[in-house]
Image (cartoon, rainbow, N blue to C red):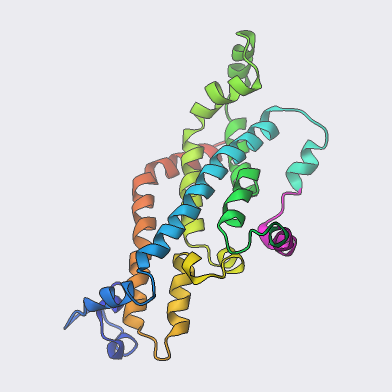
Amino acid sequence: MVVSSLRPNSQIFRSAGLALTHPRFENYSNGWNAFSQPFSHYMINSAIVVTGAILGNLLACSLAAYAFARLEFRAKRVLFAIMLPIHVIIVLQYVLYSELGWVNTFLPLIVPKFLATDAFFIFLMVQFIRGIPREIDEAARIDGAGHARIFFHVILPLMVPALATTAIFTFIWTWNDFYTQLIYLTDPDMYTTPLALRTFVDQQSATDWGSVFAMSVVSLVPVFLVFLAGQRFLLRGIATTGGK
């Protein structure tokens, strides 16, 4: 993809090699300014959605996981088993958000994260918390701590690998999410990076593929940097969660 981003359109699909004879760096400037807004505008939109999604998942999923792992309440196993993926309830959610006037805003992409809607991360954190000895909870309870204090001062600091794993996966999946953002965002000025890339192709009668590949490279840079920065936390989180 990097090599194709530096080739003229006439050579992108004609040559399968990685050799570059005359690099075309203007593909990046052309792609950056191809729309009414610079491409950074769409990356900022993606950053807003990603930040809200990460904060929501870290807070809500950790609280839900603590409840499933440590508390006893009615229908606990049933509730834990019926958490559904978004594709099953997307129609009902769209109707609800449309009635609330949230369509074409970032709210449908952020607010659900604060309601613990990502079952994968709840499962991940529940497994991690179950690996923490209950004796730690009991010692804190003897000292007079309630569930809130146990969670925030005892369990949460021990969950750093699982929280880091959740943050990294949330960043990658939300940054690259096309399906949900396509449904709720209709104004081009609200588009995120994946929607901008798709619109780039749709709006061109003769697609400038060099610019498309160039902006695809640019859009992957944040994902690459986040993965490199959090790789050790990601490996620790997966290893300690699956170790049990």
- x%, y% of residue 155? 56, 26
Residue at the left extreme of this rendering = 21
Residue found 47% across the figure and 64% down from its top: 192
Indicate whether 21 appears above or below 75: below
Quarter of the image where the C terminus is located: top right
Residue found 23% across the figure and 78% down from its top: 26
- x%, y% of residue 207? 39, 86
- x%, y% of residue 119? 65, 48
- Residues in magenta, as a range: 82-96
Q: In this view, does 198 lie to the left or right of 229?
A: right
- Would you say residue 7 is visible in this rendering? yes
Dominant secondary structure (helix, strand or loop) of the stretch shown in magenta: helix
- Would you say residue 1 is visible in this rendering? no
Question: Residue 123 occupies which quadrant of the picture?
Answer: top right
- x%, y% of residue 22? 16, 83
Indicate whether 202 appears above or below 178: below
Residue 86 part of the magenta-drawn span: yes
Quarter of the image where the N terminus is located: bottom left
Q: Is residue 153 left or right of residue 74?
A: left
- Residue placed most toward the observer, 88 or 106: 106
Residue at the top extreme of this rendering = 143
Q: How many marks?
A: 0
Residue found 31% across the figure and 90% down from its top: 14
Question: Residue 65 occupies which quadrant of the picture?
Answer: top right
Residue 55 part of the magenta-drawn span: no
- Residue placed most toward the observer, 131 or 72: 72
Residue found 71% across the figure and 59% down from its top: 93
Question: Residue 18 occupies which quadrant of the picture?
Answer: bottom left
Indicate whether 132 appears above or below 216: above
- Residue placed most toward the observer, 234 or 85: 85
